[in-house]
């Protein structure tokens, strides 16, 4: 059984739709992830923390959304909720048109296999597997027959063709993050989430990783949500959301790194 | 996913191996037990099959079949004429007679003492070694010739090897006659059986054997071969019709082999005995596996969470951990299976070292051994891994992105104490049921004891994580005093993950509890034994067989009486007899002198009664009298193995100490006894000397029995000590077998420490960075290990004492004493500390070797 979404993704991939920075063009596309009045409270009573206070947003097909904001503003919390890793205290999240907030563990696992890819700040590779084995792991977990050619293409894309048989301990940080990106792309997820993907890398390596991410959006139309503190990273996005104190306080479209630095100051001092 | 778990396992080879060791030992014990007992079994069945291989029928004496507690009486002999009668039967092709005795032909060592067979037979044969009769000969001549005339003998090669005899040597052999010298003309073995264990044999000519074993004009058996075309059954039928049925029994060779093999059932006992220890080792191993997998699962929380974010379902996570357990289990089982072959040799050596040699032949490696070993190793490991596997499934995907994510507590965790209490309650109920319910068959009784003990250990282990902190505070105190800051940290470390420390300590607890149980119970038994002997025996000396318990030739007693060394010499005869159709030990006492050496605790009667025993009086033990409603004046019928009976009257009832009554259920006068049993034997000869026991008196007594090398002269105290020593030998075996489970728990401790060190890499780096020396690091790990071992001991000692108290209570009717051997318990505690120190060696070295910089960067 195929949902309409699989179809769109495939179409997108084959068409290699060029991403544009034009917000109006994006608006025509469907929202693949949407959040309605999401709140998240940690703890009870005195020590309760309102990490997210009521956020609604839509992430559209093929769009790269960056989320910025001061430390503790709720970026990670929001992203975890969008990705179904965490449940909101109130509100609702839907991915590819179906609500995930009430799903049980098994159903959520299926959603993850089909629709979601992750890139972590600390890579989270399995140390005993080679680069290639790490990359195909999600496909094997799903037990699907997979497209070898596509996997090869992805590995080529992230520039790891000559590092397939290496284990994570034999790779640099940047190379490890490339493995993680390839792993996320390999299953052609409906949406890819990245929490500070360059947070653990130097600026040169960060730039390379950002290139890979940008290309995956441009060439494959990979819908992506990325949390970052780095204006250079956010600058590759179509739009940037600014969070402060659990709320979206600002939204920029097609902003440059410079615009973003200015905005950060505003939000930070707000 | 399968690849993930297998590769993960391969990446943690050392840890996997340490985990596997815990189960390898248990499986090796299972496989070793089977290999050993199968080999013994085969040796036995070979003996019996070969004995009757060419024998179609066997004719022997007809007697009363009396069996009691595994002992049975010898079959009576048949007149020599029977052989000619058999040979004249038309369907008989050939027949040969044998003289055969199981216990009286004692080969003497070069020092002049009887070879101690520890209860195994010392066979004496009179064999027809002529050409026609060779087919019936159960022995295989290895070297030399058969005995051809009086004064010649063939002995078994095993004894010759052990005692340094060769062909041409002279050897002393005592029989029912005093020791005589024979020339060894040949060495033989029993069929194809390499070793008969402790048993010995001496084969003479028939007429020589008849003289030595008091079989003048008699044979013990006639072996018969049928003419071609006559079936064994037909032959038996013919023989039965020709021979006097009231004198002889005729069976086919096969029937006779089966009949004989029944007495070899003790290998079954050895098998279950050893398997019980294998079970204990596996149970402890299961704890270790459970604990190790729990720790690794906890340490891999992040890995499982990442897998979950990548789309792994709970089932896949569960499967991956179970698969890991399965692989470890299967590998351990395979290694254990083969290690068992070596262990079988070790067990055999253990028995040998304890002077309990068992017969052997080519090693038997049965399919059953392979199947059971592989299955049990795998199943135990997977079962032990089930709970950690389930916990792994509880890891939420979000743990992949949280710093220091911990394994979520099981939803059942808050219920654990209640669960533990219920388990302990069930355990105690089962134990109580097993021990205090009278009308329970042996099988359910043993099962509920085993189940009860098992549950008790589980229950205590479950609750132990709650008591780890208080116990650690107490047993960790010395560490803080002698170990300085390292000791203080060690104490804190042992308390910071109570569940882990508890599970590690619980594995050791089981071994400590069982060792304590055995030690306390054994101490009580020794005390009871001494009490029972001191209450009964008033003699200065007790003369017994070399092994201390077998009946021995009456001649030794006669010699003592004739020598006139003692003031009083009272032989105590003992044999089996049937009383009112029930097999019992019957004692023959000397009415004139017994009261001077044996103190009767009269219930109804007095020493005066002894004089009235005559030929129809009997003294009965109270327990037997109660069971059979006997009182003074009641009639009794005694049936002897040769079929003769005596009508008796109860003259008195006495109450011997239930733990070790020296006399049988029924005691009769020696005169009557000797008329019922044709070759009466003494169990003891009590001797009182003038004054008290002295070296000179001992010397005189020994000289008096010099011709009876199986007789052993001991003072009463010496006899008690000898029994304690014999018992200690058995205890040593138990301790060695229990040590196996202690070793398994030692592996568990090594495992936990290695994993903890690995987990605390960063912390250790920090400690080194702020100035801790390698020495202090080592000391810290060592103290933590010792504290864990002491926690195990603190739990195990009381548990063992409790179990011993329970069993003592249950054995109340045997008047078993309960005395805690405190010095022994201190020894156990010291051993536990040593175990802790040994377990810490490798992990401590590992921790100390850490590179500070790398450790600090370690993630
Ligand atoms: N598991 C938790 N339990 C309690 N409070 C939490 C938990 N996780 C986050 N918080 C709190 O929620 C708030 C938002 O945290 P969150 O991790 O979303 O911030 P962030 O914007 O990602 O910050 P950073 O840029 O430092 O990663 C913070 O105040 C944090 O302390
Ligand atoms: Mg964050």
Image (cartoon, grey):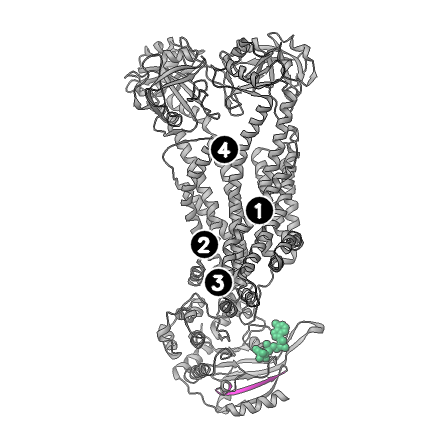
C-alpha span from label 4 to label 2: 33 Å
Residue B832: image tag: 1
Disc 2 or disc 3, which is closer to the eye? 2
Of pointers 1 and 4, the one earlier in the residue sequence: 4
Indicate which label's residue lies in the foreground, 4 or 2.
2
- Determine whether A18 is above or below B300 in the image: below
Instruction: Give the magenta part as a residue range.
Output: A234-244
Q: Earlier in the sequence, mark 2 or mark 3?
A: 2
What residue does disc 4 label? B269
Work out whether residue B232 or residue B537 is closer to the camera in this orientation and state it. B537
Question: Pointers 3 and 1 in contact (CB under 8 A)?
Answer: no
Q: Secondary structure at mark 3?
A: helix
- Residue at 46% in and 24% down: B116
Q: Position of residue B432 (x, y in %)?
A: 65, 38
The residue beneath circle 3 is B316
- Can you tell which of label 2 and label 1 is closer to the viewer? 1
Residue A143, position as x, y percentages in the image = 43, 66
Q: How far apart are labels 4 and 3 at the CA level?
A: 45 Å
Mark with earlier residue (4, 3): 4
Marks 1 and 4 in Cβ contact (< 8 Å): no
> Where residue B736 sits in the image (x, y, percent)?
51, 39
């Amino acid at each position: 059984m195929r949902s309409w979404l699989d179809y769109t993704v495939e179409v997108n991939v084959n068409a290699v739709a060029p991403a544009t920075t034009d917000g109006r063009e994006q608006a025509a596309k469907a929202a693949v992830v949407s959040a309605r009045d999401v709140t998240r409270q940690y703890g009870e009573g005195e020590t309760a923390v309102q990490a997210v206070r009521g956020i609604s947003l839509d992430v559209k097909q093929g769009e790269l959304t960056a989320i910025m904001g001061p430390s503790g503003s709720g970026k990670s919390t929001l992203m975890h909720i969008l990705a179904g890793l965490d449940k909101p205290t109130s509100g609702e999240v839907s991915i590819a048109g179906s609500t995930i907030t009430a799903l049980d563990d098994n159903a959520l696992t299926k959603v993850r296999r089909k629709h979601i890819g992750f890139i972590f700040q600390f890579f989270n590779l399995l140390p005993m597997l080679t680069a290639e084995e790490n990359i195909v792991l999600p496909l094997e977990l799903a037990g699907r027959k997979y497209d070898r050619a596509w996997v090869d293409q992805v590995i080529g894309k992230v520039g790891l063709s000559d590092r397939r048989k290496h284990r994570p301990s034999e790779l640099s940080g940047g190379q490890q993050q490339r493995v993680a990106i390839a792993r996320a792309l390999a299953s052609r997820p409906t949406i890819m989430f990245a929490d500070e993907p360059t947070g653990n890398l130097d600026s040169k390596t960060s730039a390379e990783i950002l290139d890979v991410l940008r290309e995956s959006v441009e060439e494959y139309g990979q819908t992506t949500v990325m949390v970052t503190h780095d204006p250079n990273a956010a600058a590759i996005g179509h739009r940037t959301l600014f969070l402060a104190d659990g709320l979206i306080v600002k939204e920029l479209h097609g902003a440059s790194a410079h615009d973003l630095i200015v905005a950060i100051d505003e939000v930070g001092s707000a | 996913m399968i690849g993930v778990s297998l590769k993960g396992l391969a990446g943690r080879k050392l840890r996997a191996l340490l985990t596997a060791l815990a189960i390898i030992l248990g499986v090796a014990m299972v496989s070793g037990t089977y290999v050993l007992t199968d080999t013994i079994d085969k040796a036995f069945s070979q003996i019996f099959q070969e004995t009757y291989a060419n024998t179609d029928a066997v004719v022997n004496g007809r007697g009363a079949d009396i069996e009691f507690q595994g002992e049975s009486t010898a079959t009576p002999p048949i007149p020599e004429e029977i052989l000619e009668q058999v040979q004249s039967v038309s369907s008989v092709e050939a027949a040969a007679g044998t003289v055969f005795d199981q216990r009286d032909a004692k080969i003497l060592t070069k020092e002049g003492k009887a070879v101690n067979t520890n209860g195994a037979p010392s066979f004496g044969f009179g064999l027809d070694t002529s050409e026609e009769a060779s087919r019936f000969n159960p022995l295989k001549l290895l070297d030399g010739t058969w005995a051809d005339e009086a004064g010649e003998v063939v002995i078994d090669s095993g004894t010759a090897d052990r005692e340094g005899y060769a062909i041409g040597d002279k050897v002393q052999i005592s029989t029912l006659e005093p020791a005589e010298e024979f020339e060894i003309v040949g060495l033989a073995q029993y069929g194809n059986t390499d070793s008969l264990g402790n048993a010995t044999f001496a084969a003479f000519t028939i007429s020589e054997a008849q003289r030595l074993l008091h079989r003048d004009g008699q044979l013990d058996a006639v072996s018969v071969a049928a003419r071609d075309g006559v079936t064994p059954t037909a032959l038996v039928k013919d023989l039965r019709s020709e021979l006097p049925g009231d004198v002889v029994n005729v069976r086919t060779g096969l029937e006779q082999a089966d009949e004989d093999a029944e007495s070899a059932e003790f290998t079954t006992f050895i098998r279950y005995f050893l398997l019980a220890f294998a079970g204990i080792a596996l149970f402890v191993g299961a704890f270790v596996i459970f604990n190790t997998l729990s720790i690794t699962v906890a340490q891999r929380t992040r890995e499982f969470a990442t897998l979950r974010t990548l789309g792994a379902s709970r089932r896949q996570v569960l499967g991956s951990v179970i698969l890991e357990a399965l692989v470890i289990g299967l590998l351990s089982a395979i290694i254990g299976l083969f290690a068992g072959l070596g262990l079988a040799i070790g067990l055999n050596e253990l028995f040998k070292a304890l002077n309990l040699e068992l017969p052997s032949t080519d090693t038997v490696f049965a399919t059953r051994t392979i199947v059971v070993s592989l299955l049990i190793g795998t199943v135990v490991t997977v079962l032990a891994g089930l709970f950690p596997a389930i916990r792994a499934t509880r890891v939420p995907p979000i743990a992949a992105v949280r710093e220091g994510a911990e394994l979520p507590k099981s939803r059942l965790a808050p219920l654990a104490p209640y669960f533990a209490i219920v388990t302990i309650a069930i355990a105690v109920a089962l134990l109580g049921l097993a021990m205090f319910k009278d009308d329970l068959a042996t099988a359910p009784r043993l099962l509920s004891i085993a189940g009860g003990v098992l549950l008790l250990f589980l229950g205590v282990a479950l609750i132990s994580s709650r008591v780890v902190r208080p116990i650690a505070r107490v047993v960790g105190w010395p560490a803080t005093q002698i170990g300085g800051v390292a000791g203080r940290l060690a104490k804190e470390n042992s308390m910071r993950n109570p569940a882990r420390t508890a599970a590690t300590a619980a594995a050791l607890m089981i071994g400590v509890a069982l060792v304590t149980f055995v030690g306390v119970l054994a101490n009580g038994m020794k005390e009871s034994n001494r009490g029972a002997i001191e209450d009964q025996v008033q003699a200065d000396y007790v003369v017994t067989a070399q092994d201390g318990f077998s009946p021995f030739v009456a001649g030794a007693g006669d010699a003592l009486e004739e020598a006139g060394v003692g003031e009083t010499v009272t032989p105590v005869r003992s044999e089996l007899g049937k009383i009112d159709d029930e097999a019992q030990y019957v004692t023959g006492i000397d009415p004139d002198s017994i009261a001077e050496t044996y103190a009767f605790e009269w219930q109804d009667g007095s020493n005066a009664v002894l004089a009235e025993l005559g030929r129809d009086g009997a003294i009965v033990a109270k327990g037997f009298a109660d069971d059979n409603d006997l009182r003074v004046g009641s009639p009794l019928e005694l049936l002897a193995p040769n079929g003769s009976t005596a009508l008796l009257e109860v003259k008195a009832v006495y109450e011997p100490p239930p733990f070790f009554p020296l006399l049988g259920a029924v005691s009769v006068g020696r005169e009557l006894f000797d008329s019922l049993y044709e070759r009466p034997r003494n169990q003891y000869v009590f001797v009182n000397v003038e004054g008290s026991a002295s070296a000179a008196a001992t010397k005189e007594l020994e000289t008096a029995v010099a011709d009876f090398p199986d007789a052993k002269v001991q003072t009463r105290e010496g006899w008690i000590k000898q029994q304690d020593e014999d018992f200690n030998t058995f205890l040593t075996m138990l301790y060695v077998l229990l040590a196996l489970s202690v070793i398994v728990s030692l592996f568990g401790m090594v495992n936990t420490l290695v994993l903890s060190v690995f987990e605390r890499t960063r912390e250790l780096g920090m400690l080194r960075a702020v100035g801790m020396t390698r020495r202090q690091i080592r000391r810290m790990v060592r103290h933590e290990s010792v504290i864990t071992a002491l926690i195990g001991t603190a739990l195990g000692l009381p548990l063992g004492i409790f179990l011993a108290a329970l069993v003592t209570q249950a054995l109340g009717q045997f008047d078993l004493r309960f005395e805690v051997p405190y010095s022994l318990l201190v020894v156990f505690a010291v051993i536990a500390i040593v175990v802790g120190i040994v377990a810490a060696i490798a992990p401590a070295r590992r921790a100390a070797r850490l590179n500070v910089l790398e450790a600090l960067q370690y993630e």
